[in-house]
Amino acid sequence: MGLPLFFGIMFLLFEAVFWLGTPLQTALAAGFSALRTAALEPSLAGLPRVLSGVLLDGLYNGFGTVASFVPLIILFFLCMAIVEDTGYLSRAAFLMDALMARFGLDGRSFVMILMGFGCNVPALMGTRVMRSRGLRLLTMMVIPFSLCSARLQVFLFFIAAVFPPRIAPLVLFSLYVISIAAAMLSSLLFKRRFVNSDPLVLEMPPYRFPTLRQIALRGWHEVGHFLRRATRFIAVGVVLIWLLTHFPASAAPGGTHTWAGHLGDWMSPVLGPLGIDPKLTLALIFGFVAKEIVIGSLAVIYAQEGSALFGTVAHQITWIQAYSFMLFTLIYTPCLSTIATIRGEAKNRAFSVLAVAWPLALAWVVSFAFYQAAHRLWA
């Protein structure tokens, strides 16, 4: 019963995050929208159109949309801290060792994959404890499939906007299952190339109740790391996206004749069969730099934030398109920080190229298969 109990606990964790966090997220989004209408728009009314557009439709919409998901992210990391600090994750690693061995991995690899749910970068660096180079490279190959916190906020946005609340936890849980399935498929395909020669040795800590201070510090550390990354990347990303969606000046903002429109049309033969339209394409391109930019970029592309952005996305994107987009975002090429870490840890250019190209190809195949099948069955 160990594995069914583990997946049951993880599913209850997602239920708790949505049940407690959705009302907080809705209230925070409404607060940001009210602040813009009541204070910021009148204050910036005298500025030139380009400057006010960058500040309101670019920076404020981008930061406000991302910040509204902080309650959900905080709750997720608090729940994960409870699961980890009780000593349960070591049991999960032991439970998964026999299964992971069939894929060329071991229980430590499973722990690193779980660590990747917070951020792929420290999980990749954690593979230094593995003495077998084959095991380490194979583990580094599959860690980027872990659903990190940056991708989590993308999925929370689309799930809240498109799917009804009663099935939202199931949708999120399915994405976590698919992320693990993608990792297992990859390890199965590459395990003969990267062979493990290191047996598992694991200390089993006693069960214990974590203190509130431990939980709070762990949660604050993870959320602080996320916010620092988000602040650094979003500030640059949303300004670039605003420029792409508003220039040349003769084109209608966000229209097909802007630089962003031309870029989206250029990529449409590749991503169109996946149900990903030009606007979502632009968000994906900037998501390659950092997944934190994706939601901020959508706020800029649609020139809306908060509940208005939710309504627009729900009206213009079907659930099939939304899920296909989430599948592609889940699997495709990891962010630049992750790629740089892989390059630094592996010290092998060919492996780094493989770690970028393989997820991109797999993402296209999975999203294509889902969209085409679902479109024929339910559209």
Image (tube, rainbow, N blue to C red):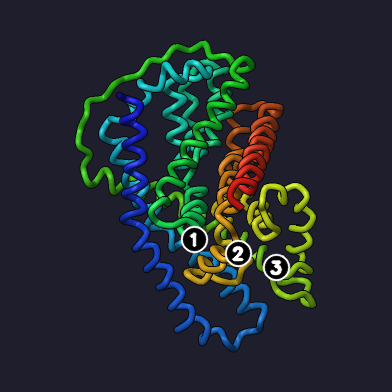
> Mark 3 and mark 2: span between their CA atoms?
18 Å
Towards the viewer: 171 or 186: 171
The span from disc 1 to disc 3 (Cα, nearest Å) is 23 Å
Disc 1 versus disc 2: distance between alpha carbons?
11 Å
**SS of the residue under disc 3:** helix
Q: Is residue 333 visible?
A: no
Q: Residue at x 31, y 24 (%)?
A: 2
At horizontal 67% and vertical 60% (from top left) the residue drawn is 279
Q: Which residue is mark 2?
A: 316
Residues marked 3 and 2 touching at CB (< 8 Å): no
Of callouts 1 and 3, which one flags the residue occurring earlier in the amino acid sequence?
Answer: 1
Q: Could you tell whether 330 is left or right of 2 in the image?
A: right
Residue 139: x %, y % from top left: 53, 26
Whole-percent x and y of residue 355?
Answer: 64, 32
Q: How busy is the neighbourhood of tag 3: few (under 14 within 10 Å), some, or many (20 plus)?
A: many
Total numbered labels: 3
Q: Secondary structure at mark 1?
A: helix
Disc 3 target residue: 245
- Residue 82 position in % (x across, y down): 28, 40
Decide which of 146, 50 is in the foreground and name it. 146
Q: Up-down: is 205 above or below 222?
A: above
Residue bearing the label numbered 1: 161
Q: Residue at x 59, y 40 (%)?
A: 331
Whole-percent x, y for residue 14 in the image: 37, 46
Question: Disc 1 marks which amino acid?
Answer: Ala
Dot 3 amino acid type? Thr
